[in-house]
Amino acid sequence: MADTIDQSKRHWVSAAIESLDPEKDYELMWRLMSCYRSSDFMNNFTYALTFPNFIVTPHGSEVVWRKDGGKVINVSTTRVEDTENYNMTWWYYGPSDPRCRQAVERINKLHASFHNRYPGNFSHMDDYSYVAAFSAILMHRLRLRIGLSGFSEKEKIAAHHFWRDMLPLFVVEGQGYAHGFPDDFDGCVKYAEDFENMPREHNETARLIGLAIYNQFAFRYFPPGLRWLGVLFCTSLSLPTTLRVMGIPRPNPIVAGFIVFFVRTLMWLSEITLPDPKEAIIRNLETMDAAGKKQRKQEIRTLDRDYAPYVKQKLGLHGCPFSAKME
């Protein structure tokens, strides 16, 4: 944490953000914007609202689903944990830090390991540009969607500059490093909306992935008998364009309105009543003792073990003709 940041106040994060210069301090600003008001619940919820948007294309969903549902079926919570560990490393350390660059390079190597099995699937430059633009505007759009204030002008500049610097760290198959990031925050919004509104046919593989991700969140955080409500939390706040491609019906407007109201109230109350944490969640995880890390890993493995048969039954994958065809 920079020496200039005063953490003595109860709500110090917003004050710190507004005290910084987004042209110079955008990495620190993004760290403050993304890493301090988070939790396992919010990270998992954000993942459920984010990742399905990236696999609406046939080439995107094919790599994730593979032949048997891949990690979203067989080790679903482990996949959430791995994804969020990468994300939090990027968000906290920023694109100029070697730890962030090393984490991105591991993703590049992971993608490269699939090139022979799925040639051309990682060669679409617009996929990378969309993920970066979407990431820059995610929380701004979500907050507006539920009726809260969006990013300030300073936050918009910081978000844009952070992801402008992140995009060129990723390698696009056969094309070198990624490029094509919009010129400003409003350009990110337009780029994302244009990408999301492109005409696309129904993608059955994307539907299965989306349902697996929504149900994972519900399975982890909602008790039996109320897991349907957990799924509705996801579908009520998911992009209509993504739901349309996946062929997942939008919730009843009254139910969706109630969920939006509940999420807005929960976030608003937490922001005005709870003190800002002094440390980011990633630092808490990094400094956790060996026993704590072992227990966390065991809890995630138990969730994976219990969820796999649950979601297979939920999606009708046991003896399902479509599943057999995929295999």
Image (spheres, rainbow, N blue to C red):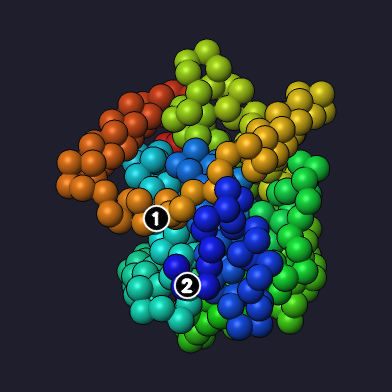
Vertical side of 309 occupied by 264: above or below: below
Most extreme residue toward the left, as rendered? Answer: 290
Vertical side of 255 occupied by 235: above or below: below
In percent of width and height, residue 213 lies at: 51, 40
In the picture, which quadrant includes the C terminus?
Answer: top left
Q: Residue at x 76, y 63 (%)?
A: 152
Q: Secondary structure at mark 2?
A: loop
Q: Residue at x 76, y 25 (%)?
A: 258
Q: From where the camera sits, is residue 288 visible?
A: yes
In percent of width and height, residue 298 lies at: 24, 36
Q: Residues within 10 Å of mark 1 (few under 14, many from 20)?
A: many
Viewer-nearest residue: 199 or 138: 138
Which residue bears the numbered disc 1? 282
Q: CA distance from mark 2 to mark 1?
A: 17 Å
Closer to the eye: label 2 or 1: 2
Q: Residue at x 76, y 41 (%)?
A: 146
Q: Residue at x 58, y 22 (%)?
A: 228
Viewer-nearest residue: 123 or 95: 95
Q: Amino acid at mark 1?
A: Ile
Which residue bears the numbered disc 2? 2
> Which label's residue is closer to the chain start, 2 or 1?
2
